Image (tube, rainbow, N blue to C red):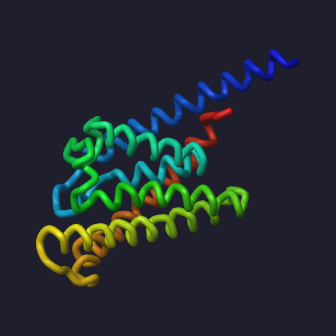
Amino acid sequence: MKQENKRLKIRNTTIDIAYISVCIALISVCSWISIPSVVPFTLQTFAVFFTLMFLGGKRGTIAILSYLLLGLCGVPIFSNFNGGISAFVNFSSGYLIGFLLMALFFWAFTAIFKGKLWAQIVGLVIGLLICYTFGTIFFILLYTARIESISLISALTICVFPFIPFDLIKLAIGVFLAKLLNKYIPKK
């Protein structure tokens, strides 16, 4: 019995690593699909939404943290094939860190409500607001330090308002696809 439990635990750990790796790859590829601007339009947020819905809070957070650490180590997995420490000191890097904050919030929020679908969706929406907030504050601080002072409304006009409709569409598609796949792909 003990040996069987050990085999099952190793199997589940291997499956977790495989799914986390696939989601890291998805986030990376989606970050490369971008329209350049001060804060690039990418499919990265779709991949983050999908990852959290597909893997759940804990494994989704591990995937997003691993993605960020790989990029920090120099692997060119961020938008425009950027990587390394310099990728964390540009105008959009606050949003990268915001993804991790989103994941942590999602994990905590869905744990409280036992992973109910409505809680997952609300967790993603509030997490997106957290990401927007952190990213915009970082943008304002960096823009002010490098170029000139910028107002909150100007920063929101550049960094948030144009993204809201697209991010909500990406959220809906990510939720739909993750729920669909979760029916057919066993994780345990």
What is the x, y in percent for residue 42?
Answer: 28, 54
Quick check: 184 above or below 159? above
Task: Please give left or right for residue 45 compared with residue 11 in the image.
Answer: left
Q: Position of residue 131 (x, y in %)?
A: 41, 65
Determine whether 9 is above or below 44 in the image.
Answer: above
Residue at position x 68%, y 57% in the image: 111
| In-image side of 66 versus 31 (left or right) | right
Q: Is residue 20 above or below residue 121?
A: above
* 174 horizontally vs 89: left or right: right
- Give the residue furthest to the front: 145
Point 81% across, 18% down: residue = 4
User: Which quadrant is home to the C terminus?
Assistant: top right
The one of 161 and 68 positioned closer to us in this rendering: 68
Camera-side residue of 165 and 79: 79
Instruction: Name the quadrant containing residue 37.
Output: bottom left
Residue at 45% in and 68% down:
130
In this view, the residue farthest toward the right is 1
Residue sitting at the far top: 3
Of 89 and 78, the residue lying toward us: 89
Q: Nearer the viewer, residue 138 or 19?
A: 138
80 vs 107, left or right, is left
Going 88% across and 18% down the picture, which residue do you hit? 1
